[in-house]
Amino acid sequence: MSAAAREVILRRIRSAVEGAPDAEIVRDYRGATGEPGDVELFAERVRDYKAIVHVVPRAEVAATIAEITKGRVLTVPAGFPSDMYAPSQGEADGVISTCAVAVAATGTIVLDAGPGQGTRAQTLIPDYHLCVVRDDQIVPNVPDAIARLDATRPLTWISGPSATSDIELNRVEGVHGPRTLEVVIVIG
Amino acid sequence: MSGVFVGMPAFPKNAAKAVQNSQLRFNLRKATHTIRGKRAAVVGEVDDWAELRQAGKTIKDHTLRNLDRYLIELEEKVTAAGGVVHWARDAAEANRIVARLVKDTGETEVVKVKSMATMEIGLNEALAEEGIEAFETDLAELIVQLGDDFPSHILVPAIHRNRAEIRELFLKKMAGAPKDLTDEPRALAEAARLYLRKRFLEAKVAISGANFMIAETGTLVVLESEGNGRMCLTLPKTLISVVGIEKLLPTWQDLEVFLQLLPRSSTGERMNPYTSMWTGATEGQEFHLVLLDNGRTSVLADKVGRQALRCIRCSACLNVCPVYERAGGHAYGSVYPGPIGAILTPQLRGMDTELDRSLPYASSLCGACYEVCPVAIDIPSVLVDLRAKARHPRTERAGMAAAGWVFNRSKRLAKAQRFGGRMRRLVPKRLPGPLSGWTDTRDMPEIPAESFRDWWVREGGADGRRPAVAPDVNLPQESRES
């Protein structure tokens, strides 16, 4: 049945567009720049989504993370830098991860299941997500992020905590994903 | 398209009823104006918006022109990545395929991510007939499903409900809703979170749509806000995605355009909270892709109307439409309401019903929809084209034929004008019988005592003299007194 449907649909398409001129793709917009992204802009745009943002020098990262995660037990995905966070014992109530790319203009973090990022479920089910972003991972805008990413990896683009505007268009942070997103930006 | 809205009267009747509902008008006005403002602000901060829009338009047009080869490329890539591709000519075939895939897993329950395509084909109802229960997990879809209601907006399907109505609904229909539930949006969202969490963790099968499919890589893309999408796309063992064939983009790079256009046009955010992208069977899942035609190829065959297939379902056109703002989404009798619905629905379903024939008229042709459309669909032009294609009522056709006969010869027109001038006091404000269709929505024009042509000749204009007084067409005092 499916093979017949495939042939019918392809035939319908060919007869529908027969004789129509091809459209040339016009790309006059700003594409990938290859330049580094603005750290301050990224921090500001992530804060706009009501996420908590810390900008810290490399040497202070471990201390900052220890401070802000006091009282929490976080899951640590394989490959997360061991000098940044030492998990305490007990039942986890959050997750810590690295990321693949971050976008300054939109305040977006992208996970690609690489080292320190875990599976997609690992950063989804806990109510708290702490993400560590290196400044060299921040790109100016979406085209640079697309250029850096591998489409065939499982990708999750995160812009602030889970939210809904379904009730009278009032934005409510936190529905099914983590209700708190905290971002540590590492400088240098 | 499916029969979810079958039997609904034509748009004018639905709209006339809807505008009487002051609560609905208040909800709609508040919602559309809020989102309109947010969109304008975030679009305003992108200085290459016009260029992105041009790219979006041309990428879609190029894809549609070469749809056959890009679909084949997509199929190859998805298959190579461990996914299974199915093709469905119409709604019934798509529903059969999905029901069979669910049955093969032995499950009788599925979780769903909000999807226009599955709503269009009436998948939930079809699955119910096969003994499979589908649970909507998007908050607004849940509100619509619990209320046994119809969606009224593409992005926020429960836009017609206010918080008090939603609270009532949750208390009545949602198992385990707290007795002391308030109507605070935060409390309502929390109740939905608790209600759905267990379901997510236990679900074995999920059904989704997709915003984009990338031919070059076989990647599917879903944009969402709540995280219910991520839950459905990643946790269940089996994932079935039902996607319209026009959702295709040729290359991975093309996504850089649409990830800038869609969130800003849709929710008025720089980026939506969550976007998931996956290629084939991912992280141990089983993946099925059902490619849906269901009328899309006949839209593609229409030279003017085919641009409707560029639509990325952002709903910006709904939010700026003066007709949508007053009539609401239900009046359109389709899962695709508003200006885009008025051109998409009659093309997908054909113009066999009175409702579908009336949709191209559900517009004042003001053009606001065209202006905000991120892929530059010229909705007013398609509306006018469809109006010409729709079968018109017999009286109107007879009237137009008679008018054509009169206007075709200047002597006939002059005679008719003189006759009309003499009879003008006898012409009622509202025409009787089937002709009332004309005067119901228009004022009867005031007929002058003398036509311009006759006045021109009488004043000697035809002989090269300059007429001394203005004709009484500009001074219709007589007719005002009468």
Image (cartoon, rainbow, N blue to C red):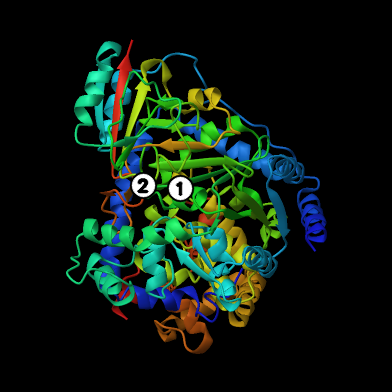
As drawn, which residue projects farthest toward the front?
A89
Q: Amino acid at mark 1?
A: Arg
Q: Nearer the viewer, residue B441 or A178?
A: A178
Q: Residues within 10 Å of mark 1 (few under 14, many from 20)?
A: many
Same chain for mark 1 and mark 2? The answer is: no
What residue did someone put label 2 on? A177
Q: Is residue B373 visible?
A: yes
Q: Position of residue B362 (x, y in %)?
A: 47, 66
What residue did someone put label 1 on? B230
As drawn, which residue projects farthest toward the bottom?
B433
Q: Is residue B64 above or below residue A85?
A: below
Mark 1 in CB contact with mark 2 (< 8 angstroms): yes
Q: Position of residue B360 (x, y in %)?
A: 54, 65
Q: Nearer the viewer, residue B431 or B102?
A: B102
Secondary-structure class at tag 2: loop
Q: Residues within 10 Å of mark 2 (few under 14, many from 20)?
A: many
Q: Quadrant of residue B268?
A: top left
Q: Amino acid at mark 2?
A: Gly
Between the residue at mark 1 and the residue at mark 2, the CA separation in whole angstroms equals: 8 Å
* Residue B97 appears left or right of B122: right
Q: Is residue B136 above or below residue B463?
A: below
Secondary-structure class at tag 1: helix
Image quarter hosting the C terminus of chain A: top left
Q: Position of residue B167 (x, y in %)?
A: 25, 69
